[in-house]
Image (cartoon, rainbow, N blue to C red):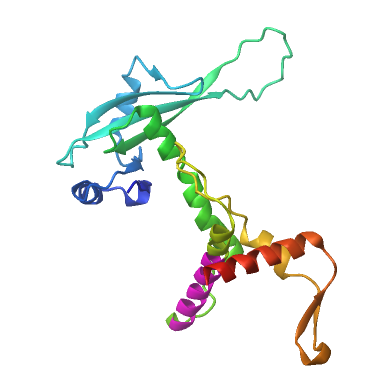
Amino acid sequence: MNPVWTQPFLSETILSLLDSRYVKFTASVPFARFPQLKEIIENRKRWRTIDREWSYFETKWKPKSWNTTYRFIFTRRKNKKQYKGPLQLHLFERRDYQFDYKVIVTNKIESTKSVVLFHNGRGSQEAIFGDAKTDAALDIIPTKRLAGNQIFTLCSMMAHNLSRELQMLASPTVPRALPKRPSSWAFERLDTLRHRIIQRAGRLTKPQGELTLTMSANQTVRQDLLHFLNVVKKAA
């Protein structure tokens, strides 16, 4: 397993538990909780290059309150410095850069570039929660009672998971894992599927006693509906 933890959950207890269970992890280290990190960065003279944008150095370190030493990777990202004064459109104007710093703690033994790419790929995982909140109302507390909120949350999770399960059945997977560990499927948002397939004008009629849904002619919608129906039949 290769989870990614961010600042609110970072503690030696959790890292030690993951390490003892042979779980590979990376976690962002908050500067506010460990002011020693700022001093380490300021005293650093040599940074190794990852690419034109990123550079790094790493060390075995532990905060004073911890008992275990871990691999800490210090990264900096080069950004163009924003000028707030009058813009001088000179042909050979000097460009200044500033750096954004980030520290990662990990027990992974891969190269630094692989660890940084893996850690930065957590945005793909966070997008899942973002879609669930936006498209399945998972961030809403609709009632003042526990049971009502539990039922609403379970329904939201089921709607979100059902849309993903159907797409996983209907789409091929990526043939190999990528460095940033994105999803193995190219998912469309539930809101997109809802507008394209579900929220369409139609009429339920009973010609010759058979219940029939009649919709306006749309070849794309027809292909999508038949595709998902065929996939569900094969999986049943």
Q: Is residue 189 visible?
A: yes
Question: Residue 84's x, y, as percent?
Answer: 65, 25
Q: On screen, 88 above or below 24?
A: above
Residue found at x 59% / y 59%: 170
Q: What secondary structure predominates along the stretch shown in magenta?
A: helix
View extreme (left): residue:
67
Q: Residue at x 30, y 26 (%)?
A: 58
Above or below residue 128? Residue 162 is below
Instruction: Indicate the position of residue 36 as horizontal and vertical percent values.
Output: 28, 31
Specify whether residue 194 is in view: no
- Classify residue 37 by image quadrant: top left
Decide if residue 156 is on the left or right side of residue 45. right
Q: Residue furthest right?
A: 217
Residue depicted at 31% across the width and 42% down the height: 33
Image coordinates for residue 188, horizontal then vertical, percent: 62, 55
- Say which quarter of the image contains residue 41: top left
Closest to the observer: 28 or 114? 114
The extreme top residue here reads: 92
Residue 161 in magenta stretch = yes
| Nearest the eye: 219 or 181 | 219
Extreme residue in the front direction: 234
Range shown magenta? 147-162
Taking 182 as reference, is 42 left or right? left
**Circle count:** 0
Q: Is residue 140 magenta?
A: no
Tell me: 171 left or right of 219.
Answer: left
Asked if 212 appears above or below 230 in the picture, the reply is: below
